[in-house]
Image (spheres, rainbow, N blue to C red):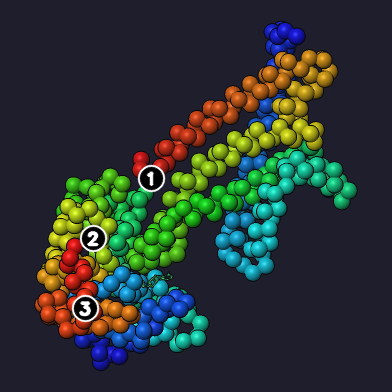
Amino acid sequence: MTWDNEFALSILPDLLGGLWVTIQATMSGILIALALGLIVAVIRYLRIPVLSPVFGFYVQFVRGTPLLVQAFAAFYILPDYGIVLSPLITGIIVLGVNYSSYTAEVYRSGIEDVGTGQWEAATALSLPVRPTWTRIVLPQAVRSIVPMLGNYWIQMFKDSAILSLITMNELLNVGQTIGSSEFRYLEPLTIVGILFLAVSYPAAVLIRRLERRLALTS
Amino acid sequence: MSERASDVMISFENVDKSWGDNHVLKHLNFHVKPAEKVSIIGASGSGKTTILRILMTLEHPDEGVVTVDGDELWNVTRGRRIRRESKQMKLTRRKIGMVFQQFNLFPHLTAIENVMEAPVQVLGMSKEEARERAKGLLDMVGLDKHLDHKPHRLSGGQQQRVAIARAMAMRPKVLLLDEVTSALDPELIGEVLGVIRDLATSTDMTMLMVTHEMRFAEEISDRVVMFDNGTAIEQGPPQQVLRAPENERTRRFLHAVLEH
Ligand SMILES: Nc1ncnc2c1ncn2[C@@H]1O[C@H](COP(=O)(O)OP(=O)(O)O)[C@@H](O)[C@H]1O
Ligand SMILES: [Mg+2]
């Protein structure tokens, strides 16, 4: 089988449409992960009896089961309980919930990276709780949190391809559909790969640069 | 307590502290007069840092009363639940400043921002006023050329001088110094000791410092206290404690330290 330029060009618009869905799903998933992860991290941090351990288990549970299993569970089981969502919405929620567990851990480790010496210096200066957080701890934590999150965002972008298996109309799904109807997989799948790379590679470079910019020694 | 307020700046009454089986402070009674410069010496692990950390409210005693400038900082009855941050404690704590062995500067802030932070956030001072105060202090510690440098661009000696200026910005009545030169390269120790010497001779701040710099302690202290096993085993004027110690353990300790 040889590469057919004309065929490749003809399927490009559909594939770009798929990429757009992938990007939208990733972005939405990121927002969910950021918000839910924050809630999880704060509740775990506060060490509330019962509630905090429950959220600790949540993190372990979500991280310990494959994304695909979670996606299938949401896609096939939720409708039995009367919750009927489109594949896109289901996929976004699964992606967001899945990565909320990683995001929560990123927040936690970002805060823990700020050494006890910083907290003690704040106490020695009688800084109240609020400025200790907003002016001392969080500005330092953000510097390690942002690059870590960025790496997870790229991973989410790539992992979203798994959601093609619950018929979400994202990039891989579009490529596969074209392949099976045209009996040619070479061009669609190659372009799918290139498009993923075309986004993830520059994003990775950007994040590395951001990391260097944010470093405390800059 | 009020009748003693005028002649006692720091007081430890029957203070106990242990970690597990490690009984670090044993019914410690210890007093420092206003404006007095006291050096604490003693072997590693004898509880010197713990005393300063209890004063800075970074640790709590298991039992006992600690007052500063007549105000209660800690009043702990064994077995009773400790409220870590009472209102009274927060107010009293403002009278105390501390300089740490590892500087603990805020790495994301410049030198002058490090010094301005507490006056603005705690005292509600305007930025301009705080900047003026910070400038004056950084000038005093010889860092007027480095106002806008972040800590990573400063040498250890410079960082520690910023840390001293930062503590001074709150105009503390009591300054705690915990081995502030022991993380420094030998050639940088002098500049930091110089700043502390200036503070000791030109202010009536009460200073309590833990140090292994015996000659420096002798030079600036009104009193030297030797700690061993959680109690003060010997204290008095520096010439006496450092030159003619009566306690055998003090003698052995000084012998070991001065060997180096
Ligand atoms: N947070 C802590 N947990 C357990 N043990 C501690 C802690 N802080 C200090 N110690 C112990 O208390 C003793 C006294 O410590 P410290 O006050 O730091 O001594 P020094 O400053 O005289 O070297 C040491 O044995 C030390 O190991
Ligand atoms: Mg110590």
Depth check, mark 2 against mark 1: the one in front is 2
Q: On screen, B160 above or below B222?
A: above
Inter-mark Cα distance, 2 to 1? 24 Å
Name the disc covering residue A72, or none: none
For residue B94, side relative to residue B256 (left or right)? right
Q: Which residue is disc 2 drawn over?
A: B181
Image quarter for ligand 2 equals bottom left
Q: Which residue is disc 3 drawn over?
A: B250
**Residue type (three-letter) at the residue carrying disc 3:** Thr
Decide if ligand 1 comes within 8 Å of the CB at mark 3: no
Disc 1 chain ID: A
For residue B218, side relative to residue A198 (left or right)? left
* Quadrant placement of the N terminus of chain B: bottom left
For residue A195, side relative to residue B226 (left or right)? right
Residue furthest right as drawn = A80
* Quadrant placement of the C terminus of chain B: bottom left
The kind of secondary structure element at disc 1 is loop
Q: Which residue is disc 1 drawn over?
A: A216
How crowded is the residue under tag 1: few (<14 C-alpha within 10 Å), some, or many (20+)? some
Give the residue at x 84% y 18%: A181
**Residue type (three-letter) at the residue carrying disc 1:** Leu
How crowded is the residue under tag 2: few (<14 C-alpha within 10 Å), some, or many (20+)? many
Is any part of residue B126 visible from this angle?
no
Disc 3 chain ID: B
Disc 2 chain ID: B
The kind of secondary structure element at disc 3 is helix
CB of mark 2 within 8 Å of CB of mark 3? no
Inter-mark Cα distance, 2 to 3? 22 Å
Depth check, mark 2 against mark 3: the one in front is 3
Give the residue at x 30% y 86%: B29
